[in-house]
Image (tube, helix red, strand yellow):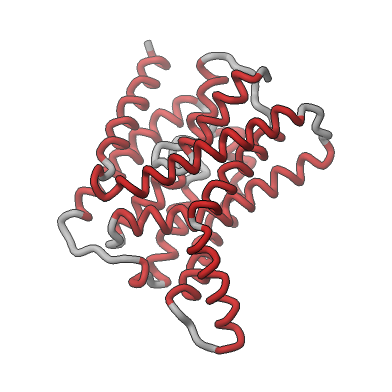
Amino acid sequence: MDSLHVIALALIQGVTEFLPISSSGHLILPSAIMGWPDQGLAFDVAVHVGTLLAVLAYFRQTIINIIGAWLTGFYKKEQTPDSKLGWYIILATIPAGLAGLVFNDFIEVHLRGTLVIALTTILFGLLLGWADYLGQLSKQHDLTRLTITIVLIIGCAQALALIPGTSRSGITITAALFCGLHRQSAAQFSFLIAIPIIILSGGYKALELMTDPITYWSDIFLGIAVSAVSAFICIFYFMKFINRIGMLPFVVYRLILGGGLLIWIFI
């Protein structure tokens, strides 16, 4: 890939990974619509590393608190809100991890088409809008009100994000809103449970790379840098303005994108 393609694809990954608009769907589109060459497995790993660095940097104090409380809970035999949150993050990761092991090959072969992306973009965009609307009509809670049931619902929703166009952050925020969390708490939990998922998916792809030596390290480091910086900026502004702007702009964007893709496919 040339540098322009690297920067463009890394920006797409960085911006869309944490917005509720589907990063995998957007990364498929350049090759499907514009005929760009496939970015390759090594580049996939690189942009995953970049987005992982971004979320770790943004939530660094929260993560330190969770790990500290989680480890302390082992020898003090008591649970704090932070240690519970650590367990909930692990629990929410299990459904998606299992689904990835079982269905990954099927999804790669049968569900990465442009039509699937268009339909899931529209369907889950409407669902996100409905969840946000209903959430404003009822009492909302923060992360201290999480329960095992709520966490499992969000975790199972995260498994659906294996389908291109769904959006991992979008479907988990949707599930969290349906379960009564307010917007900022829904987004925060969605981003926190992204950490083990990004590690697992990036690690899985990295294992496949062991038989495929990398020869274009400059592209790899450029992809990491661009995706990390763009993802951090995206998280910062999303968390800053989410309570003010709500989910409507992302719903509208998904409907326009999905509708445009359907027109491109059938006309």
Nearer-the-camera pick, 185 or 205 = 185
Q: Position of residue 53 (x, y in %)?
A: 59, 48
Q: Where is residue 125 in the image (x, y as percent from the top left)?
A: 33, 38
Image: 35 above or below 134: above
Q: Where is residue 241 in the image (x, y as percent from the top left)?
A: 30, 45
**Residue depicted at 39% across the width and 21% down the height:** 261
Report the quarter where the C terminus lies.
top left
Image check: 227 left or right of 158?
right
**Residue depicted at 39% across the width and 69% down the height:** 149
**Residue depicted at 57% across the width and 31% down the height:** 10
Q: Looking at the rendering, which quadrant does residue 106 occupy?
A: top right
**Residue depicted at 48% across the width and 64% down the height:** 62
Outermost residue toward the left?
A: 137
Image check: 89 left or right of 222?
left
Image: 244 above or below 177: above
Image: 214 above or below 1: below
Q: Looking at the rendering, which quadrant does residue 39 occupy?
A: top right
Nearer-the-camera pick, 101 or 82 = 82
Q: Where is residue 187 in the image (x, y as percent from the top left)?
A: 38, 53
Image check: 121 left or right of 137?
right
Image check: 249 left or right of 1?
left
